[in-house]
Image (cartoon, rainbow, N blue to C red):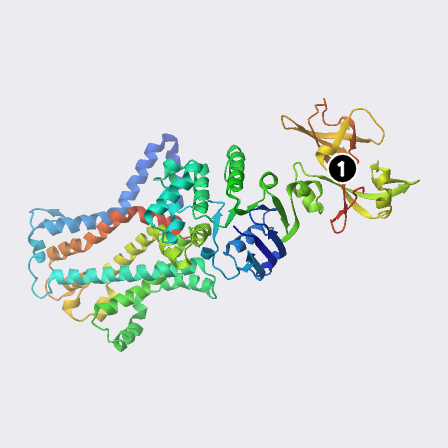
Amino acid sequence: MMESREFKLSFFQKHGEKIKNTIVIIILLVISLPIILSYLWLVLNSFASEMKYGIIPTKFTLEHWRFLIESVKGYPNIWQVTLNTFIVAIMVMLLELFITSFAGYALSRYKFRGRKTMLLTILVLHSFPSVSLLVAVYYVLRTLNLINSLWGIILLKVALEIPWGAWIMKGFYDQLPWEIEWAGTVDGYSRIQVFFKVMLPLVRPGMAVTAIFGFLSGWSEFIFINTFILNQQTWTLSRYIKGVIGDFRFVDYGLLTSISLFYMIPTLVFYFFANKYLLQVNITGTKG
Amino acid sequence: MARILLKNLSKHFKNVKAVDNINLEIKDGEFTVLLGPSGCGKTTTLLMIAGIYKPTTGGIYFDDQIMNNVPPKDRGIGMVFQSYALYPHMTLYDNIAFPLRAQKMKKDEIDRLVREVTKNLDIGKLLDRKPFQISGGQQQRVAIARALVKKPKILLFDEPLSNLDAALRSYMRAEIKKLQNDLGITTVYVTHDQLEAMTMADRIAVFSMGKIQQYDTADNIYNYPANVFVATFVGTPAMNILNVEVKNYNGDFYLQDEGFKFKTLPQRKEILSNLVEKKLKLGIRPEHIRLSLKETENSIPAEVYVLEPLGREVIYNIKIGNNILKVLTEERMDLKPGDRIFMDFDRNRYHLFDAETGKAIDISIR
């Protein structure tokens, strides 16, 4: 389908780049319209008390953002939930960063039995749907007495994120020439000292990328929390939103949209700062 | 300062013998070049001296002390890498101070040593910069400063000049040689460039296929190559090699193949009489061949194949039978491809090699 469209465009080529570009932009706009509209609706709805035809806001209000100051009836305190979400996201990020910094180095630098198999299975593991693990994981968490605990969720998330993170870190280590590491040992340092003084500082962009992915995956985790967290006090934001949608009472769209926006803020902030590092993954991180 | 001794040293990577049972003694304060084509084992040998690779068998000794299991950091070596391997995240100052900080030296002592080593290398004003902000030649000098700053017993260079342009390379060649001369540090220098080897080395070890082919002074390697490999690898343009047999015609000995025969000096009768009918290779350096337009006694007819003018000299490629020989001379002759010409060579300066083993045959007149 893509190809036939490009073929038709070639008809316009003789009229110059401009027409071509305009058409491309229009097509892209049309394709992304549903996404743009839904975000637009989200923003508008959270600040409007009434919507005409479902999309045109009529009255500005901050009413829906009251959940920030006072607890909504039937739901836990929002700040407690936000704190929980942050704990999960940051712990997942830190643990993943710690482990994959070493794991990526080992995968990149050491030749050991099963290394190649490991590298291949890592990618398969990452594409495993986590839903399929739910029952097995339930038994594990129950045995460890970690049901209803954020730590259970954190360990679970870290375990599932390590392969991917290790793969990314390996890509960044692969970029560093052996000679730099050798120079460090000749200069009077042991290999582990060289790792901390030379190698780690040089894979900082990789660590930034891994940190971002780790944080976001912790931040957006839903399935495990929905399944293994029963106590409202240990909810995270995603579970909170599910609560707002899924209850039997009338859905409060104002509340839903404002909490959703609130939920998105850290993600946006992270992307804003991490842009330049994320771009490097395409170049370096995917190299075998 | 230290003497380096390699005893029956081998390094195997899986089935490949990268270094195959070599013996080498490098005297204290000597500048030794390991010379050879890529994949000949010279860099592997250097990395074993540095302690980065562990030998498969054999021993590495510094001053009679076995070093096989001593890690690089404790070997008292300084090393300059082909890519310079500067630490990109550190300033030049920190790069050079890095080896000193490993020794937990005091700050002002570090400062003094860094200033001292950079003064002569003309990089004193750049110390606040990062490696990517300076030129390749400057990076090279920083790498040398970093290797020198801790006053090593042994200096190792791994093709340090191959990333520089020709003019800078020629300049640094002299600089490094001067530096080594002044400091008197035992130096091992790896290169594939025979010009670097000839100009810098006290002694050259010529490597091929993981073995040392010859270990001697530059002069001896050039004038008395031990085998065909050394003869053709050292010297530009390379030595001409012709397949010949020794023939005895009425008591005169000739080196002969289809299309030519050279009469030899009567003083070599005795040596050559033992080689009659044996398959040999004749080696003649391009600068020992003379060309002339007129036929002389003993000269051989040839045909001009192509000319390579070098400015000061010209390389004439001439064809004898099916062989193309290179002739290097300063003399200008108005020649063009296809012209008939006569060639002769200095009968005191040629080499004979065993065609099977490639080993040089001693034909010196005693």
Disc 1 crowd rating (10 Å Cα; few below 14, some 14-19, many 20+) is some
In the displayed structure, A122 sits above or below B93; it is below
Total numbered labels placed on residues in the image:
1
Residue pointed to by mark 1: B349
Which residue lies at the image location 23% right of the left edge and 63% below the top edge?
Answer: A222
Would you say residue A220 is visible in this rendering?
Answer: no
The quarter holding residue B299 reads top right
The amino acid sitting under disc 1 is Arg
In which chain is the residue bearing label 1?
Answer: B
**Foreground residue among B116 and A107:** B116
The quarter holding residue B364 reads top right
Residue A266 lies, in percent from the top left, at 20, 53
**Foreground residue among B79 and B113:** B113
**Foreground residue among B328 and A232:** B328
Looking at this view, name the residue that lies furthest to the right: B250
Which residue lies at the image location 13% right of the left edge and 54% below the top edge?
Answer: A258
Residue B318 lies, in percent from the top left, at 74, 32
Which residue lies at the image location 39% right of the left edge and 53% below the top edge?
Answer: B103
Q: Secondary structure at mark 1?
A: loop
Left or right position of A84 against B48 = left
Left or right position of B352 against B44 = right
Looking at this view, name the residue that lies furthest to the top: B334
Would you say residue B321 is visible in this rendering?
Answer: yes
Left or right position of A133 against B247 = left
Left or right position of A225 against A70 = right
Residue A149 lies, in percent from the top left, at 21, 70
Which residue lies at the image location 75% right of the left edge and 32% below the top edge?
Answer: B289
Residue B74 lies, in percent from the top left, at 46, 57
Quadrant holding the C terminus of chain B: top right
